[in-house]
Image (tube, rainbow, N blue to C red):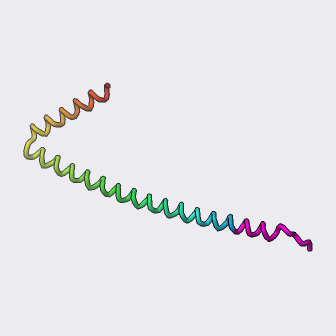
Amino acid sequence: MKNNPQAGPSGSAERTANEMTDRVAAQVESAVSDLAQRGREASRSVREVTDNFSTALDRSLERQPMTTLALAVGVGFILGALWKA
């Protein structure tokens, strides 16, 4: 068996590299988990806003159908003008 003087430092460097890799992997996993949670929260918030808007639109149609129609036409006109610009 040969006595390899580089075996000690090389093993130490490999161990250090493995530890660093494990730490980075744990940080990435934590960041991905955090982003996924924030995405779920954002999705839930968008769903709530959509539901609230839908409810408000339904009420507006029932109470003031002509005003709602006029607003829809106005918004459509503005979006159309912006689309062409």
Q: Is residue 59 above or below residue 44?
A: above
Furthest-left residue in this view: 63
Specify the quadrant of the image occupied by residue 76: top left
In the image, 18 versus 71, the foreground residue is: 18
Q: Quadrant of the C terminus?
A: top left
In the image, 2 versus 33, the foreground residue is: 2
- In the image, is 10 to the left or to the right of 59? right
Q: Is residue 76 above or below residue 46?
A: above
- The residue sitting at 70% across, 69% down in the picture is 15
Expressed as whole percent of the image width and height from the top left, the position of residue 31 reads 49, 60
- In the image, is 24 to the left or to the right of 16? left
- In the image, is 45 to the left or to the right of 9? left
Q: Does 43 lie within the magenta span? A: no
In the image, 58 versus 18, the foreground residue is: 18
- The residue sitting at 23% across, 31% down in the picture is 78
- The residue sitting at 73% across, 66% down in the picture is 13
Specify the quadrant of the image occupied by residue 36: bottom left
- In the image, is 38 to the left or to the right of 57? right
In the image, 68 versus 4, the foreground residue is: 4
- The residue sitting at 30% across, 56% down in the picture is 45
Q: How many marks?
A: 0
Range of the magenta residues?
1-15
Q: Quadrant of the N terminus?
A: bottom right
Specify the quadrant of the image occupied by residue 61: top left
Q: Main secondary structure of the magenta part?
A: helix
Expressed as whole percent of the image width and height from the top left, the position of residue 46 reads 30, 53
Expressed as whole percent of the image width and height from the top left, the position of residue 25 reads 58, 63
Furthest-right residue in this view: 1
